[in-house]
Amino acid sequence: MIQIKKKAICILILSACIAAGNKAFAQKQDINQKVEALLAKMTLEEKIGQLNQYNGDWEATGPVTKDVGNKLDEIKQGRVGAVLNIMGTEHCRTFQDAAMKSRLKIPLLFGQDVIHGYRITFPIPLAEASSWDMGAIEKAERIAGTEASASGINWTFAPMVDIARDPRWGRVMEGAGEDPYLGSLIAAARVKGFQGKGLGSTDAVMATAKHFAAYGAAIGGRDYNSVDMSPRTLWEVYLPPFKAALDAGVGTFMNSFNDLNGIPATGNSYLQRDILKGKWGFKGFVVSDWGSIGEMINHGYAKDNYEAAEEALKAGSDMDMESRSYINNLAKLVADKKISVNLIDDAVRRILKKKFELGLFDDPYRFINPEREKTSLNRPEYVDAARDMARKSIVLLKNENNLLPLSKNLKTIALIGPLAKAEKELKGFWSLDIDKNEEIISLMDGMQSHAGQTKLLYSQGCGITDTSRKGFDDAIAAAKKADVVIMAMGEAPDMTGEAKSKSNIHLPGVQEELIKEIKATGKPVIVLLMAGRPMIFNWTADNVPAILYTWWLGSQGGNAMADVLYGDYNPSGKLPITFPRSEGQIPIYYNHYNTGRPAQNDTDLFYKSAYIDLPNSPRYAFGYGLSYTNFEYKNIELSKSTPSMKDNDILSVSLMVQNTGKYAGEEVVQLYLRDMVSQPVRPVKELKDFKKILLQPGETRRITFNIRKDELSFYNDKLERIVQPGTFQIMIGSASSDIRLQKSFELTN
Ligand code: BGC
């Protein structure tokens, strides 16, 4: 009886799935037909108009093209398909009204860099990546998407999924760090968060995977610089997060400013046509980066905008952001028979399709509802989520003698440093000033609401970039009066972000001098470091007993820091990027090859493969981060020691993790693999899986990882994905530098 019931349920579920599948198919067909019908009515000029995107009148995020006509008039003439930097329903309405006056009334897309929150500022993406918590990251983007879509925005230029191995690069703050596996999971989580139930729901914004591709590998970490990269590195390290975004359903891709091996990404057919639209079958559209079509002239790749437009369209760039190369040249290129109308049609189709999917043809004003805007922004539950995300983003780097968490019984705490009272700074780069009255919780505010009877003293000590020690005496005096000193140090928020690369990434100014002076008072010192990149702070790392890396945590930053300092939240963040000891070590990343003479800490000059003035190891490794409790790893077991390579074969690895300390806490249990002998060679370690678990004091949990064939595969020098038999090492640990359990297995044919 039970069997029959089960069968009936299965049939019902199956029929429902088929019905849902049929509906989706029918909807797709329907949209395709509508696109074709509309396309058939469009003049060449109107088609070209759809490929043109203008900056609006909010702050420009790139060099604005001069001597242009009236934008609203151009929209009315059907010469614009999308605008960016227009915010708020009222504003969007003005522009959409203009589009509704055009002959075919094709609605505009409203694009915006919604990078880490819209009205409520969440932590910067690199900080969020430190949470290794996909649910929390997806939720953060869901909130950003809900707020933005209630303000008229229907398209975000996020997530940035560029892998970055160079902390000098200013845009490292905008991504998920150095690892392709972690980066891919985060890319997918962000896309899902922005797009919610899918394009078509009124609270979804269309996401953009950017910058395609390899932008994060700019030589020397200098923004916009050239990229010179082997095809294997491209495929193994830089492309996976883009593929993950695509698989998660991302609507659009943005190309990038850099050239890749001599060909600007914007004019790169291999990237956009062969890989993205060919091999990967991407059906959405590609928008250029700001002005990047015209910039091919500076690259020396095109003679003028006419040639640049030809190269870009042929290479698969569908929409021109702000360079006006398309609007000014495509018609002539068609007349001159340099470009076929079919190529233009393909780009227009892709854009129209997204507009249909977003529901803009059903109602061009569906995201423009002032009533909804009033009630959807800044909701208390969003504030709570921002605080939670911020706590999860903090990384505990050091905690000697359990100096943290703070006791609630302290008489006096001194808060010292240029960022102790910082407010706006906590928002970091790429935050939007939607509401000038956004409540921002500084560290001081957060401490005040937690401190109870404890007296809080304050002294700035110095400014971020100060070279003067003028404020030191005051800070030392405050420290002397306190039981504990908390120092809030770091960079300025605009020291990371676009065009914000730095050659010197040490803690700026005299800040480390101030830390030395305060430490010399003999008081217990806790240093909080705020920045959008890994900084270098060797003296502090060696001498200060407790250090928290807080990045830029967004508007709830102060509450989150106080939650962690007082132990209301036990820190669980893990670094998504390696911290160097010196700029001279850059690029430095955990998943490197072994070399023929690997560093072995020996004194033999010829077997070190290291610097003579520095160890090879980083200051803090990828995956590193402490907790107020301790975790013990034990009892590793494999389901088999000689698995075969049959497609569906799974190798299970299990282990026990115990919380041996006195606080409940979360641990990110990380699984790395190494293919011991292979051709070509493989990295010394590659993250393949992890689990973030919460354990109560004393609690033990068995954790199981399933390794599949795909996780053992890699690209050979012909760019074929292969698996080679042989020995593999499984390494499980709390950081890439802290492997606790190991086991090897032999993969057979
Ligand atoms: C950035 C993009 C951004 C665009 C629009 C460019 O300068 O590289 O990431 O989406 O501006 O603001």
Image (spheres, rainbow, N blue to C red):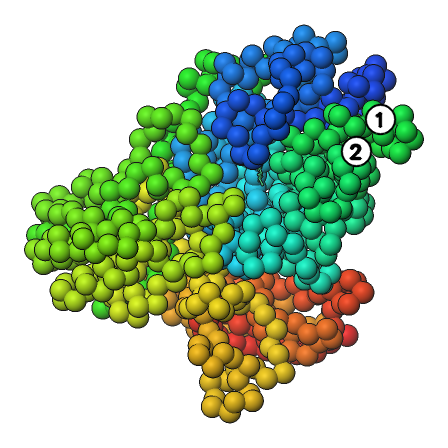
Q: Position of residue 261 (x, y in %)?
A: 72, 56
Q: Is residue 728 visible?
A: yes
Q: Residue at coordinates 87% horizontally, 28% vertically from top-left?
A: 334
Q: Residues within 10 Å of mark 1 (few under 14, many from 20)?
A: some
Q: Quadrant of residue 182?
A: bottom right
Q: Residues within 10 Å of mark 2 (few under 14, many from 20)?
A: some
x, y (%) of residue 239? 67, 53
> In the rendered picture of this protein, how many numbered marks are placed on residues?
2
Left or right? Give the position of 181 relative to 486: right
Q: Is residue 662 left or right of residue 110?
A: left
Q: Are marks 1 and 2 in contact (CB under 8 Å)?
A: yes
Task: Give the numbered dot on residue 306.
Answer: 2
- Considering only vertical position in the picture, is 530 above or below 153? below
- Residue at point 38%, 70% (across, down): 632
Which of the image's four quarters has the N terminus?
Answer: top right
Q: Amino acid at mark 2?
A: Tyr
Q: Which residue is mark 1?
A: 332
Spatial CA span between label 1 and label 2: 8 Å
